[in-house]
Image (tube, rainbow, N blue to C red):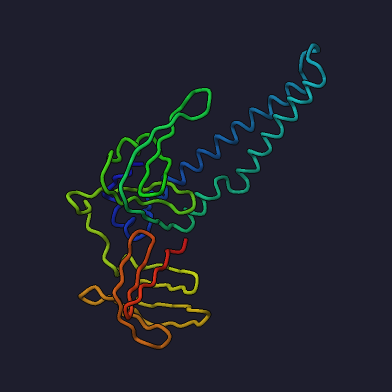
């Protein structure tokens, strides 16, 4: 998957997966499950061959050990597929939400601890780390400021855009788009829907009303029966609302 896919940027900025992205991850999950079932089948066959047709020179202890280990691994692989395989990725595909992080990027390549000494490709944005495929690693810039989009549960990177001369290669989302979704902190929760409805819960008190963004970019919202006007901004998964000189920070709900 190309992490610099301009066709998907508009949807990813809105916190959504495109149909093509969703299908690509679903196909990857299916291939992983088929591979797991293939390995499980081979292990079951080995267990039968060793248990039934092993050479007489193989001791009973070794025969039992090989059969038990092979059956154990095969059963665990089958159960993993039957119970949903990669649960984190499956959950991301069901919800379809995309999160974002903004910051300086660095690239790291590490050797995996296996017999083939394969490489692990890592992108670091701000204080977060993401393991990516080689094609995504090569396509990402070596340095500079970037906006990286990812799936919250599995942390799969779905897109990335770089700053050019202080500005993102694509225009940042306006507040009226970026704010859509659910946000919370320790004492409050707010949900902004695309049709202009806002529901809020503050210290256990629930309310509902309308919300909008005016021409000056200010947030208008009805909270607890009161019409409030506030400065608001969204940066990645963080919503900051400034009201009467006080700043309230809420995080996007996964």
Q: Position of residue 38 (x, y in %)?
A: 59, 32
Residue at the location (37% across, 48% down)? 158
Task: In this rendered view, identify the residue nearer to me: 97 or 105.
Answer: 105
The outermost residue toward the bottom is: 225
The answer to whether 206 is drawn above or below residue 80 in the figure is: below
Give the quadrant of residue 36: top right
Task: In this rendered view, identify the residue nearer to me: 85 or 245.
Answer: 245
Compared across the picture, whether 226 is left or right of 58 comes to left
Task: In this rendered view, identify the residue nearer to me: 42 or 142.
Answer: 142
Task: In this rendered view, identify the residue nearer to me: 198 or 79.
Answer: 198
Compared across the picture, whether 132 is left or right of 74 comes to left
The answer to whether 217 is drawn above or below residue 238 in the figure is: below
The outermost residue toward the left is: 165
Q: Position of residue 90 (x, y in %)?
A: 52, 51
The answer to whether 26 is drawn above or below residue 41 in the figure is: below
The answer to whether 192 is drawn above or below residue 26 in the figure is: below
The outermost residue toward the top is: 57
| Quadrant containing the N terminus in the rendered view | top left
Give the quadrant of residue 170: bottom left
Residue at the location (76% across, 26% down)? 65
Q: Position of residue 250 (x, y in %)?
A: 41, 68
Residue at the location (74% across, 21% down)? 50
Compared across the picture, whether 32 is left or right of 243 comes to right
Residue at the location (42% across, 45% down)? 129
Q: Position of residue 154 (x, y in %)?
A: 48, 49
Exactly how many numbered labels are in the figure?
0
């Amino acid at each position: 998957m190309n992490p610099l896919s301009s066709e998907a940027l508009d949807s990813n900025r809105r916190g959504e997966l495109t149909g093509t992205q969703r299908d690509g991850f679903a196909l990857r999950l299916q291939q992983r499950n088929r591979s797991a079932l293939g390995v499980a089948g081979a292990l079951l066959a080995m267990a039968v061959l060793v248990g039934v047709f092993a050479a007489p020179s193989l001791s009973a202890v070794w025969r039992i050990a090989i059969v038990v280990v092979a059956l154990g691994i095969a059963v665990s692989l089958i159960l993993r597929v039957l119970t949903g395989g990669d649960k984190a990725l499956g959950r991301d595909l069901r919800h379809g939400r995309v999160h974002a992080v903004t910051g300086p990027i660095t690239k790291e390549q590490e050797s995996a601890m296996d017999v083939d000494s394969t490489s692990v490709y890592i992108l670091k944005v701000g204080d977060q780390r993401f393991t990516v495929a080689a094609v995504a690693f090569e396509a990402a810039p070596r340095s500079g400021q970037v906006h990286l989009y990812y799936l919250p549960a599995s942390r799969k990177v779905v897109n990335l855009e770089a700053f050019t001369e202080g500005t993102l290669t694509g225009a940042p989302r306006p507040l009226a788009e970026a704010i859509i979704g659910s946000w919370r902190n320790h004492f409050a929760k707010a949900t902004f829907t695309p049709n202009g409805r806002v529901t809020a819960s503050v210290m256990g008190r629930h309310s509902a009303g309308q919300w909008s963004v005016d021409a000056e970019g200010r947030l208008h919202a009805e909270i607890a029966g009161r019409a409030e006007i506030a400065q608001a901004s969204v940066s990645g998964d963080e919503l900051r609302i400034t009201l009467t000189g006080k700043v309230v920070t809420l995080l996007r709900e996964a």
